[in-house]
């Protein structure tokens, strides 16, 4: 607590309100403004959350043009499809302990819905293309042979995509994609889902078909 001896124009020592009084070696009275407290730095937990959030959004952003439809029904009116996809990934696909967080690509979804998935599906590299194949269970599942296949090859290291949305149908049982831009050592991820012939927001939950390191 500061002490004011000679009124507002007199010298004082200590703190009064927003000013601090003192004197120098010559006996001169000095008044200075009280410095504001520095904003507290982010806590360790906040920094960890920011790191994880950045990993999720960094993965999802290049896919946003697909997510707008592939999560639209599940997101409903409460949030955007992109936010729903990120929220799901944040809750289900992050692994590891700080500072070594990782994304489990097998648990990430790029679509979610009520159409049937295929029990047997695969993707493999053949020369400079990725060949997708699957069984057609449309006779027994909640699906139609005219459902459109959405195939995705994702270079997760370069945020480069190759995709096909509707060029082939579920009933065709196969399709191919050219490789996206790649460099040696890049990690390619393969995903497959199906959408209704007439409504792109009615989809199956995506299937992760594995990965490949470019050699």
Image (tube, rainbow, N blue to C red):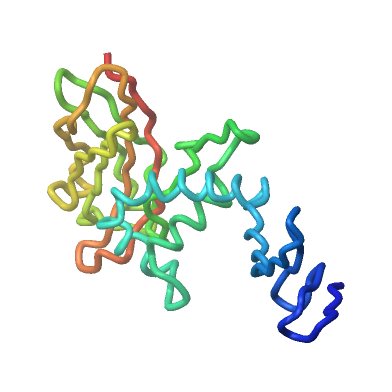
Q: Given the current orientation, which residue lies at the most extreme bottom position?
A: 7
Image coords of residue 211 (percent x, y): 36, 27
Q: Which of the 4 image quarters holds residue 20?
A: bottom right
Depth check, front residue: 45 or 6: 6
Depth check, front residue: 25 or 165: 25
Left or right: where 168 falls relative to 61: left
- The residue lying at 30 percent from left, 50 percent from top is 63
Q: Is residue 183 above or below residue 114?
A: above
Q: Which of the 4 image quarters holds residue 72?
A: bottom left
Q: Given the current orientation, which residue lies at the most extreme front position?
A: 26
Image coords of residue 130 (percent x, y): 21, 28
Image coords of residue 158 (percent x, y): 28, 33
- The residue lying at 34 percent from left, 26 percent from top is 187
- The residue lying at 39 percent from left, 69 percent from top is 80
Left or right: where 84 falls relative to 209: right
Badge count: 0
Image coords of residue 207 (percent x, y): 39, 43
Q: Is residue 148 above or below residue 15?
A: above
Depth check, front residue: 114 or 81: 81
On the rendered image, what quadrant is the C terminus found in? top left
Q: Is residue 186 above or below residue 60?
A: above
On the rendered image, what quadrant is the N terminus found in? bottom right
Q: Is residue 130 above or below residue 68?
A: above
């Amino acid at each position: 607590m500061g002490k004011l001896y000679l009124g507002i124009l007199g010298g004082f020592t200590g703190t009064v309100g927003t000013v601090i009084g003192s004197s120098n070696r010559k006996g001169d009275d000095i008044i200075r403004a009280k410095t504001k407290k520095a904003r507290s730095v982010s806590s360790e937990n906040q920094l960890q959350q920011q790191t994880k959030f950045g990993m999720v959004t960094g993965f999802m952003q290049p896919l946003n043009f697909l997510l707008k439809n592939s999560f639209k029904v599940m997101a409903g009116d409460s949030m955007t499809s992109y936010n729903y996809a990120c929220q799901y990934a944040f809750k289900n696909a992050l692994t590891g302990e700080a500072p070594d967080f990782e994304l489990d690509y097998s648990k990430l979804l790029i679509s979610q819905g009520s159409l049937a998935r295929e029990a047997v599906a695969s993707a493999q590299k053949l020369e400079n293309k990725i060949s997708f194949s699957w069984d057609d269970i449309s006779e027994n599942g909640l699906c139609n042979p005219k459902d459109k296949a959405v195939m995705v090859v994702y270079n997760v290291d370069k945020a480069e995509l190759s995709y096909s949305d509707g060029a082939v149908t579920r009933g065709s049982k196969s399709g191919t994609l050219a490789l996206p831009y790649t460099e040696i050592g890049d990690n390619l991820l393969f995903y497959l889902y199906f959408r209704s012939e007439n409504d792109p927001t009615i989809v199956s939950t995506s299937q992760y078909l594995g990965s490949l390191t470019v050699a």
